[in-house]
Image (cartoon, rainbow, N blue to C red):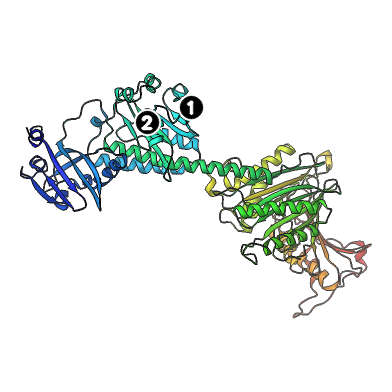
Amino acid sequence: MRTEDLLAAIATGLWRWDNASGRVTLDAEAARLLGLPPTPVELTEAAARSRFHPVDFAEINGIVQLAVAEETLAEARLRIVDERGRVQRIVRSRSRPRVVDGGFELVGTLQEVPEPQPGTSAAHTPITGDWRRSREAFLLDAGRALAEARSTAEVLRVAAGLSMPGFMPDGLAVFGIEGDRLSVIGHHGPHGDEERPSAGTALADDHPAAEVVRTGRALYLPTPEEYSRRYPTAWPVAAPFRRTSWAFVPLVNAGRTIGAWMAAFTQPVAFTPDERSVLTTVARMLAQALARAGMQEEQQELALGLQRSMMPTVQPDIPGMTVAARYVPTGGGLEVGGDWYDMIPLPSGRLALVIGDVQGHDVRAAGLMGQLRIALRAYASEGHHPDAVLSRASRFLAGINATEPGGHGEDQRFATCLYIEVDPATGLLDIARAGHPDPAILLDDGTVLIRPTAGGLPLGIVPDADYPTTRLVLEPGETMMVCTDGLIETGGHDLDTGWARLRDTIEAHEPGGIDESLERLADALVQAVHGPPSHHTTGPLVDRREDDIAVLLLRRDGAGCSIGPGGLPARPVRRTVLTVAQAEPERIAEARRQVREVLHDWADPDQVDSAVLMVSEVVTNVLLHTDGDALLVAEISGERGARRVRVDVADSSDELPHRRCPGELASSGRGLVLLELLAGAWGVDPRGDGKSTWFELYEDAGEAVGPLSPESESEPAA
């Protein structure tokens, strides 16, 4: 009997599809199965396409490419439709693809699909567009989940939780390569560690995972008999788990086999082309996710090493002071950038706190940060004052920029920096600032004030830049916070709104023990920007990190309150101090802002406006009528609702002010008149090295204008 007659007797047709020429040849039985007259016929590709469901025919190319890659049969289930698109029957195509010039040639059989056998994966897998749509949705979800996994453990956890459409693995294992042996990267199964695959298998062993790694081709073992026949040595290890089907698929990334993935099934699986396609696609995504996670873990390990080497631990045993610090890298990439902090013991017995930010978030920024930090430590250890330390550091960074490869510094970087010399015994702070945000002070009564300091250009812009020094005193019970701009401006904030957010966080902080309180405050500041886990791990909030963050907190220990009437603690005094130099008239605006901040919770807004106006007038008089600087001290004392604010503006001139009678169009001469009209009390006190003009306001507004001081009664302010 001829082969054609034998195939016809079992209702099987022959067909040949030449993709290069676009012709499809059918024998009589194949033509009948396609709904055509039962005679041999040759069709165009378009005519043959019209006999198949469009979704099914569109997938043949993918099935053929898979068969070519695996050197296996191309098997597909195809729906035959009539002229109206109604499904007439389902046929199974089994064919051997062959690559030819310009395409492929497919020669095989067509056979009507019988009812599936109960208990197999095919019995539960309808050959419809719905199944394919669910498969596509599964692959999209799997790809998204694997792409978001950021560690090897997370990739394996995602792979173990994948619910494949129509068939579900009961056990999974991922094998890696270590030299000439396989290693088990991870596994999953209902019996936990009892089900761990054999580790240490040699690549030359008779094991399906080893063969997959050697050849780069997938292995499908649909029955235990097939497994034991092909791999008798490995079968005794797999037999106790009572699985019925296994798939071993290579993990290939960038053209290189990096391991193998095993999917084991309790129910029998036929491994149809659709099922093999799903497994192969998942394996490709799994390989990419594992490679990506491995690279990220290597980068994170490098970043942590850099952080440990560049971010010193703060000195815990400073007499009379407590320090806390945090560093949070920006999201993505190397996760280390140009922000840093440092604590430097000085030859004088004092210590220096340094915080800075090199421009950029890349490896170059991290490298420059390390060099600049070492240079600052060297200059500080030589005993230079804060202004000299920053001047030398600016010259150092400018020199690096000038010698950058490519000539004239094509990738010039600058750095902001705040250098603070601290005397732990007295709380004296000498501050030099290079384009960096000002420090903030948490007063003993819970108020937060920004302390304005004189400053110069960022480091590295001008080799011989000057950096004036500002002297402040950290009172007992007060805490200073210095930070980089990442803590202030993250989340779309500018300097003003960012400071307002930090002020709310700091003022809402509940103090506890000194050490514990400062650590909790450092955590609260980071959480206000990124959320709780940010400075511990690089978890799901990593994408919210727009910039590096460094923050230093310095608290002077000891209570700043005294004993009031009845032996009860008096409310702490709130104080701010500011110097306005002759060469800095623009700092008068800063003086007004400082007074307004000190009075931020004052009961009467009109009194606040009056205080700001009087400060402006008194400080301006010092700059206009003397040749010295103005020293402003504003402090609040008393209980809320009955507080007093006293403002002193001192200068070095012995000449007392005189009352004037300005005309309507005069532009000056009204300063002391305003004091007399607005202040609750005011006066001018001579001092050994100058004088002090002062005024007071009372929150209960029950006091009239107070008497002048005795020294100024003989010659009232004129």
Q: Nearer the viewer, residue 338 or 436?
A: 338
Characterize the local packing of mark 1: few (<14), some (14-19) or many (20 or more) Cα atoms within 10 angstroms.
few
Characterize the local packing of mark 2: few (<14), some (14-19) or many (20 or more) Cα atoms within 10 angstroms.
many
**Residue 161 place in picture, x, y as percent:** 41, 33
| Viewer-side label of 2, 1 | 1
Up-down relation of residue 655 to residue 449 (above or below) = below
Question: In which image quadrant can residue 269 be found?
Answer: top left
**Residue 228 place in picture, x, y as percent:** 33, 22
Up-down relation of residue 624 to residue 84 (above or below) = below
**Is 476 displayed left or right of 599 in the figure?**
right
Q: Which residue matches tag 2?
A: 263
- Disc 2 residue type? Ala
Q: Secondary structure at mark 1?
A: loop
**Quarter the C terminus occupies:** bottom right
Residue at 40%, 34% in the rendered image: 261
Label pair 2/1, CB-CB below 8 angstroms: no
Up-down relation of residue 181 to residue 352 (above or below) = above
**Is 18 displayed left or right of 280 in the figure?**
left
Q: Which residue matches tag 1?
A: 200
**Residue 266 place in picture, x, y as percent:** 33, 25
